[in-house]
Image (spheres, coloured by chain):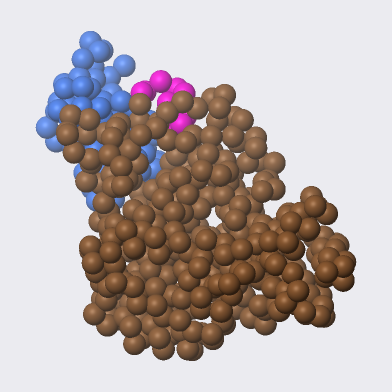
Amino acid sequence: MIYLDSAATSFRKPESVRRAMDGALARLSSPGRGGYPAAMRAADMCWLCRESAGGMFGCEPMSVVFTSNATHGLNIAINSVVPRGGRVVVSGYEHNAVTRPLAARSAIISVASAPLFDNAAILERFRRLLPGADACVCTHVSNVFGWILPIYEIAGMCADYGVPLVVDASQSAGTLPVDMRSLGARFAAMPGHKGLHGPQGTGLLLCSGEAEPLICGGTGSMSASPNMPDFLPDRLEAGTHNMPGIAGLKAGLDFVKRLTPERILRHEQRLRARLERELNAMPGLEVFGGGGAAQAGVLSVRSSALDSEVIAERLGRRGVAVRAGLHCAPLAHESEGTLRGGTVRFSFSPFNSEAEIMRTSQIMRDILIKS
Amino acid sequence: MSYYLLMCRSLTYAQRLARELEKYGIGSSVTRGPQNAGTGCSYGVKISERRLGDALRAAKNAGMDPLRVYLNDSSGLFREVSV
């Protein structure tokens, strides 16, 4: 299989992730639940993972909270900073993981929309909308079009206007610098199972302020109190930890550190640019590229002749895994005029090769010719 | 053998304190605390008797004063000590 759906989940994991998860099942019990060796080994693994993530993302290990995915983290962040009915500024490229929790809080959503890859235009929109807002929630990279938004400039504006910022780093963690100190963000949420190459069911929430727990329960600390602890990470980590997941995530972080996010990004952008060139030459295909350095390893296309789902299904039958449709981000499609029909999305990982890209473009050509 | 236990408000705090002590060359290990510490389940950092002063100074420098300090002597019982 040629796997080109890493924006959803990086399916091909490093071997070290598999080994770490196997080892965790054999050797780790539950942290904070006992003082015996298996519990303390689990506690050590949690700490090492927090320390590794803190080093990569510019924050203290204590501020690294384990979640089950980015959506989980975004829900905590949004519930912590957005007052009911408050006004929130978002980019026009947000995922439902942002817009649905905002809708659940009856937030008034101000959308900073701009043409794809036009950084100056989107910054101008944010500049106009931020004054007086209760919060800003912004994706770092569009999961549909791969646009790398100017998040540090947006963060600077949020600081100027005193608006708390939540960063959705779902598509950037592991390939782009996400530095909490430089961003000054209140929260940044990320999955463990995409660019960090950990297993599904893992995620991280980086916190720099007060946070409201989404669920309450046992934490292995302050057990005599009826209330959740008022300190991190315990405040946000009720219940038993996903130890195989955390061990796998730690191995994934190590893998990214070894390769370096810069090299991973370069590799993925090179593959994206290659496929973009090939697909641009195919008649009847609209390619949402041209972003250059402002476009990560994500490429969307649509055909005037074939439905997106049909293309994805035919690619799948010939061994190429891609995603079609709205990619859980209707707002992004609304911004680009692709809401009707959606797009076919190709997204890359360090495990993809140029040969796979050439094979994919050949198959795409066959599919389009036969339509 | 007797040792001191520097109590922390959580397991993760104890882990962080152990890391801080490591920077000062103070050997330590994270362990469960006595149930009579008053907060329910708790964790602390175990250090040798002779390093208490160094450990408290290191903790203070890191802004991590322990909640309580216990001495566990050869009887196996914890006795809170004032520092």
User: Chain drawn blue, letter?
Assistant: B
Per the rendered image, the range of residues in magenta is A34-44
Residue A269 is a magenta residue = no
Q: Is residue A302 above or below residue A226?
A: below
| Image location of residue A363, percent across then percent down | 85, 63
- Viewer-side residue, A217 vs A49: A217
Residue B34 visible at all: yes
Asked whether residue A261 is in view, the answer is: no
The relative height of residue A338 versus residue A367 in the rendered view (above or below) is below
Q: Residue at x 65, y 35 (%)?
A: A19
Q: Residue at x 23, y 67 (%)?
A: A85
On-image quarter of the C terminus of chain A: bottom right
User: Quick one: B16 or A208, which is closer to the camera?
Assistant: A208
Q: Residue at x 33, y 38 (%)?
A: A238
Task: Determine the main secondary structure of the stretch shown in magenta.
Answer: helix
The relative height of residue A123 versus residue A75 in the rendered view (above or below) is below
